[in-house]
Image (spheres, rainbow, N blue to C red):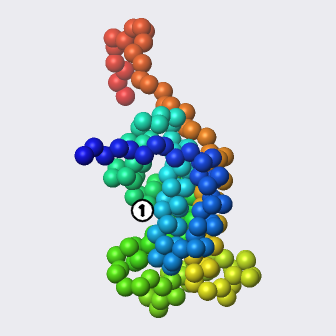
Amino acid sequence: MIKRRKPPIKVEELSADSARFVRDLQRETDRGVALAGAAFVADALRALINAAFVNDIEIAERLLDGERPLGTMSARIDIAYALGLIGPDMRRQANILRQIRNSFAHEHQPADLAAPGLKSAVDGLRIYLKPLERLENANPRSVVVMTIILLTNHLLLRALSTRHVAFGDDFRVTNRPVPTTVTKI
C-alpha cells in the first residue's frame, strides 16, 4: 500500500476552519479535547513553519510531512522556537499541551483533565490565562480548551503575517582571472 502525502495545509483554510473546530472541541470528551486540540496546534505550527520557509512546497512538505524530520509536534515546537517564530511562553504552552495529549494517547483509563496527575500541567497553562480574570478559577477542561484556542489563533495570525524567506545566493564561478600570486600573511 502506497502512503500518500496529505496536501499542504494553507493558513487561510486552517483559519477559516477554526470556528468549526472550536464548536467541535466543545462536544469532545476530555480525551478528544487533548488529542484533537494538540493536532490542531501541530497543524497551526506546521502552517507557520511552512510560511517561513522558502516558497518551495515540495521541500517544505518533505520536511513537515508525517514521519519526516519535522513531522512531530515536538520537532515543530522546537524548530518554530529556534527560528524565532514563537517565543518561550508559546513554546512552553505547546509543550504542556503535547504532554497532556501524550498522557491521554498512551492511557487506556478513562480520560479526565481534572485528574490529579494532570494538575501541574493544567496549572502550568493556567498562569498564561491570568489576565483573563473569568478563567482564573476555571475548571481544568476550560483552561485546556481556552489555551488551545488562544495558542492556535496566535499561531495562525503569525502565519498569516509571515512571509517566505528569500532563497539564498548560489555560489557562482565568474570569468574573472584567478590571482596567480599568493599574498603571505
The residue positioned 42% from the left and 18% from the top of the image is 172
The residue positioned 62% from the left and 79% from the top of the image is 142
The residue positioned 52% from the left and 35% from the top of the image is 55
Foreground residue, 162 or 150?
A: 150
> Residue 98: x, y in percent?
45, 69
Left or right of residue 62, residue 1 in this image: left
> Residue 100: x, y in percent?
46, 76
The residue positioned 74% from the left and 82% from the top of the image is 134
User: What residue sits right under mark 1 in the picture?
Assistant: 74
Foreground residue, 27 or 181?
A: 27
79 lies above or below 102? above
- Count how many numbered circles sit on residues in the image: 1
**Residue 127 appears in which quarter of the rendering?**
bottom right
Residue 133 is at least partly visible in this image: yes
Foreground residue, 116 or 87?
A: 116
Left or right of residue 156, residue 131 in this image: right
111 lies above or below 73? below
